[in-house]
Amino acid sequence: MSFEPCLIIPLYNHAGAIRQTVAALSVHRLPIYITDDGSDEPTRRALAQVAREFALVRPARLEVNRGKGAAVLEAMRRAARDGYTHALQIDADAQHDAADVPKFLAAARAQPDAVIAGHPVFDDSIPKARLYGRYISHVWVWIATLSFDIADSLCGYRLYPLAAALRLADRVKICSRMDFDSDVIVRLYWAGVPVVNVRTRVTYPADGVSHFDVLRDNVRITLAQARLFFGMLPRAPMLVWRKLRAKRAGETGNWAHMAERGTVLGLATLNVIYRVLGRRAVKALLFPVTAYFFVTSARGRAASLEYLTRVFEHQGPSPALPRPPDWRDAFRHFQAFSESALDKLAAWSGRHEELPGDFAAHQQIAALAATGRGALLIGAHLGNFEMSRALGTSTGLKGINAIVYSEHARRFAATLAAASSDFNVNLMHVPTLGPDDAIRLQEKIDAGELIFIVGDRTPASENGRVSTVPFLGAPAAFAQGPLLIAHLLGCPVYLFFCLKEGERYRMHLEPFADRVVLPRRARDQALAAYIARYAARLEHYCGVAPLQWFNFFDFWRPVVGQTAPRSTPGQEHERTQTAHA
């Protein structure tokens, strides 16, 4: 596909801002198609002056105001007749950062058949009502597309492939006013046009002029979203099939390379709804969201059922699994994960008082804090590990640090920080442990702080070291990293699990070792012994709460490219266990 881009500006009564906007865009030396959508006389004069001053400006006028969408489509048709293939739409009011034009152009050159959609990064100038209202609109767009592919459905900073956009406009009636942006991008998505999201800074100038009518335009947007929802229903099989096909094409073996679908974006949305409408409203959304991911995640369903079957066969019947598991139990597993996400949000955003529980472990943590010693706490993706957030506000700890392996977890932390003004957990991204990382961690321990790490994920890097030990009746790879870190730090080590019992949480804190010792001559055997002890305790707690272990991938699959001898702990395990119990 050829690539001949231009710029498009829909203009309505922005006499004071249009020259500033055009001047900022002119440095990119692209033709600028401006459609005056029936503006007042001052704006007509301002546009005429801009056209005389900037040779790249190509103005046109609609005598009667027909709406933003109508102005954009008029400019698109003129640009297409002049031979341009792509059009970057930008608002006239100077909210959008003209310096980001090259980012949009580069993304379009890389994928010329896609819509390049602006994903706004707002500063404090945005009115809070507008910010929260946007997220409600986004939720309906995600439902209409059965995906999170469109990060922001309302941003007017967007680059279109003209042929696809005009083909759509000739075939269906697109909304023409403030509902245009969400309507057109959803319909293009339905038509198979990919969406690429580009982050861009957006400000609301103090002297800016907004033509958004709170009542009238919100009604229009709501009606458009209702039409899109009902339009989605007959398209749902096609949309689900498209997601499944794309998912199969992008599968890889390592858990860190799997897309944690919609987690960050979904959490941000849940946070807004939580703040505006409360916990009950968020909980009402969980069932359809869970059902969608359950239906579209064949690999997740299979991994869930395999794990539940192993728990049942190895640990025997339990109140949570009284009979051999089937797909209904896999769905309950998914639902438990969704509910845990809601509880994580409450814990990290400072609302842990909404989560009733027995936190006897607070006393142990408080006692540890009183000694002034730092410690390493090893947990798992079991229950609500994030209740460590509650510890920091109730025990007088000097600091809480959490080690994460993947870049996704770092982005996740940024979202959590946005959820709470007193977010006080330091997330340390350590994909591989180097000397600088070891020094940072040692400084935390020496300062009497706690370091949290999970032990049930292998390293994201392909050369990470693992030990393979028995887990739920079969060999499974566990990362050596947590035990290597414990050995380097020479600090006390605890196991930390927080399980939900009915509607309450119970923390479990177990001493693991006063310090981890790895003798040079039997290093691998000692590591395997420690890891086998950890795996045995994780196995125990999985039996206590089988639906609360949230690793939806093949945990027993051999780890490709990660090296360490397969170890079956024997007498060395027993000696080490006795020495460090």
Image (cartoon, rainbow, N blue to C red):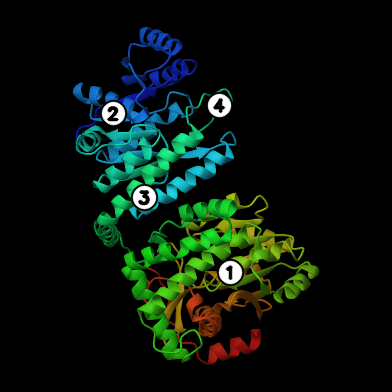
Are circles 1 and 2 on residues that touch, CB within 8 Å? no
Q: Position of residue 358 (x, y in %)?
A: 68, 76
Q: Residue at x 23, y 46 (%)?
A: 191
Confirm or deny contact between disc 1 and disc 3 (CB under 8 A): no
Check disc 1 and report the residue beneath it: 385
Separation of marks 2 and 3 at Cα, in angstroms: 24 Å
Residue at image point 34% right, 19% down: 64
Q: Residues within 10 Å of mark 3 (few under 14, many from 20)?
A: some
Q: Mark 2 or 4 closer to N-term?
A: 2
Q: Amino acid at mark 3?
A: Asp
Label 4 crowd (10 A; few <14 / some 14-19 / many >=20): few
Q: Which residue is mark 4?
A: 205
Measuring from the top left, give residue 307's x and y in whole percent.
41, 80
Give the Cα distance between marks 4 and 1: 42 Å
State which mark lies toward you, 2 or 4: 2
Q: Is residue 463 visible?
A: no
Seen in the picture, residue 176 relative to 521 is either above or below; the reply is above
Q: Amino acid at mark 2?
A: Leu
**Label 3: which residue?**
149
Secondary structure at numbered mark 1: helix
**Given the image, on which type of amino acid does mark 4 rest?**
Pro
